[in-house]
Amino acid sequence: MFNIPFLKDLFDTRFLRTVSDAEYNLRGILSGKDLHYYVFQADEQDQQKALSELYRKDGIYYFRSDMVQGKILEFPVKSAYIEQFIPSGTENISPASFISNILSVSEQDRKEQWDPAFTRYQNELEMWLAGFAVEAETVKMENGSSALDFSYEIPMEEVNSQIVALFAEFSTDPDVNALLDTVMTQEEKALYVNENLLYYYKEALNSFDMDKKLTMNKRVSAMGEVLSFGIGLPLDEKSTGYNILRIESVSGLNVYTLQNQKEVIVFGLPDQKNEQDTTYEKSIWLAKVHTDPSQKDLEDNFSLRMDIKKSTSVYKKGEGDDEKNHEEDQYDIILEKDLTYLPEDLNPESIPEFVPVKAGINLHYSSKYAQNVATTLEVQASIIQGESTLAFTGKFKTAVPWIFMPFEIQDPIQVGTEKEKEIITYLTDWVSNAASMISHNSVEEPMQEEKNTDDVPEDAQNETGDSESAETAPLEVEEAE
């Protein structure tokens, strides 16, 4: 039986048992690119205790807590995580930063600015494809309508030459460069979008297997609408670790498949066309399968689909001065086993069973008509897997701004993208100290009676008894506009 490790740990850990069944105050303020959030409990004299703070300055996040005195954590910017997958070496500027910026471009900007700027190059590609032999076949759809299937096979040398030619064009295109200026520094552009370095880019494209052909297929309706599109890029396994990258677009879903002789990775994302709709449904696929029977880690294989449903209701309640506007956003999420987009030659028995996960999130906003009246957000969330349940409730309000004093940052502990012994020590100390500092709603504080676990292996520390659920009490929150 396969279970996602972080879900298993999340449901029943020392941390969750320590912070559950307690009331907290959360306050936060945003000031330009900086922010300051802090969570605490109030004692009988309404004084703060068990305080933890998150502070962002110049794009970098810092965390300090009363639970671990004298130590501050510093978190890397998000581009540092991308660098794990696309390292730049020791001399070149990493592409992680501008890739992160491109991925952060809003859907509206993408449609209104980026798509029009690249339409010309899309049209040029269509004209280029027309110069290659194509096989066409008429097919009958399930709904009874007819469609045409087109298939292409193009030598990779031709593909690389066309990529370099298009790159030479848009690297000097003023409209494209104006857009790139919003996501790249001049140093990054000088390295990655430089017409004088075309020879370098051509060499970089050798990560594709030059002895093979690119395969492409698309299905077009009788009205000329592209119903599905697929492309297969042969990769050089020595330099990439994989021998093929497949990209498929069908029914509003983009599926990416990386494969070699021992492993298959599949990632499916929906088109982001209805993100702002009041109601939508979308699905995400993720699979990683070891195909080599000699591998001992076949139990780690998984192929999962996440279904996300959103519904929004807007209404008014109350009369006269008590009338309020209300908006409720309901998200329902299901994570379960699904083999739909795995390669056909893959043995389905190599995928172990998976206990489905169900999650629900309800965001309820309410406010009166008058200006400067606080907006209230009530949150209810739950995650269920098998007999385990994690629940959370919170109440947030906007409030008038206040002046905050950022904590002093001295010799922070760098939080890397991989676990480090110093970080594990910090988290262990945090949980141990929090057990005696946090006040719980129940009479007994479960962590007080725990035995000393200094000499107990980490896996043993996570073992629990029969308790399989945890629930936080409502959070009273004031957040500045």
Image (tube, rainbow, N blue to C red):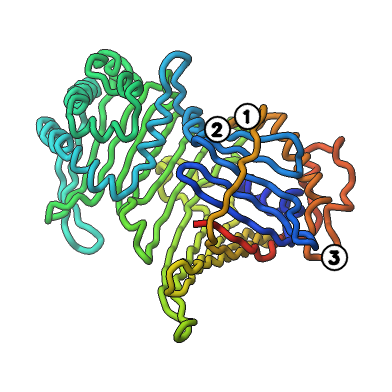
Mark positioned earlier in the residue sequence (1 or 3): 1
Q: Is residue 222 visible?
A: yes
Residue at image x 83%, y 57%? 446
Residue sitting at the far bottom: 319
User: Quick check: marks 3 and 2 in contact, CB under 8 Å?
Assistant: no
The picture places residue 412, in percent across and down from the top left corner, at 65, 30
Marks 3/2: CA distance? 40 Å
Tell me: residue 156, above or below residue 70: above
**Residue 386 drawn at (x, y percent):** 65, 60
Q: In the rendered view, does 13 fall on the left or right side of 217?
A: right
Rendering coords of residue 95 (x, y %): 40, 26
Left or right position of 299 against 65: left
Residues packed near mark 3 inside 10 Å, few (<14), some (14 to 19) or many (20 plus): few
Disc 1 target residue: 414
Helix, strand or loop status at disc 3: loop
Could you tell me if the residues under marks 1 and 2 are in contact, i.e. CB atoms within 8 Å? Answer: yes
Sequence-first tag of 1 and 2 = 2
Asked whether the viewer can see residue 291, the reply is no
Mark 2 lies on a secondary structure that is loop
Q: Secondary structure at mark 1?
A: strand
Question: Mark 3 sits on what residue?
Answer: 443
Indicate left or right for 386 with 332 as reference. Answer: right
Q: State the CA–CA distance, disc 1 to disc 3.
A: 38 Å
Q: Which residue is mark 2?
A: 76
